[in-house]
Image: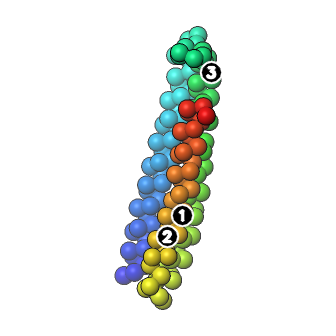
Amino acid sequence: MGSKVGRNEMALLLALTSLILALASIVAIKAVSALPLMRGSISSSTNTVSAEEVGFVYIAAVIPVATSTIAAAIALYAVASAGFAAMTEKPELRSWVLIFAGLAEGLAIYGLLISILVISRI
């Protein structure tokens, strides 16, 4: 029974990771497809930005999210498989497994933060 629960939870986590990656891909496709529609430049209060730069900024913002999501999925797979094996022998290790799983998911959050910084051009 324990291995079935582990497989179901792993499948759910991989599905969520795939969803994040798919959403990042949609943003990249939208940025690339919007390039021909934009003409000239986009002006804001501080500077003028060309349409190509806007598209490249969105593509540059998608890359950290996609790679960190894949890395988080790989790390979470390792943590979950080893954690479930360890919890079957010592149930008191449950809190450590949750901490390590949170650290693995932190990789995806770091990629999201970098993408926000890229979009805001800091």
Categorize mark 2 by other alpha carbons within 10 Å: few (<14), some (14-19), many (20+): few
- Depth check: 115 or 24 in front? 115
Q: Which mark is residue 103?
A: 1
Q: Quadrant of the C terminus?
A: top right
Instruction: Report how far apart the C-alphas of labels 1 and 3 lie in the structure.
Output: 36 Å
Q: Which mark is residue 121?
A: none
Q: Is residue 83 above or below residue 28?
A: below
Q: Is residue 117 above or below residue 92?
A: above
Q: Quarter-wise, where is residue 79 in the image?
A: bottom right
State the image coordinates of residue 24 (x, y, percent, origin top left).
51, 41
Looking at the picture, which amino acid does disc 2 mark? Ile
| Residue tagged 3 | 52
N-terminal of the pair, mark 1 or mark 3, is 3
The residue drawn where x is 51% and y is 83% is: 86
| Residue tagged 2 | 99
Mark 1 or 3, closer to the camera = 1
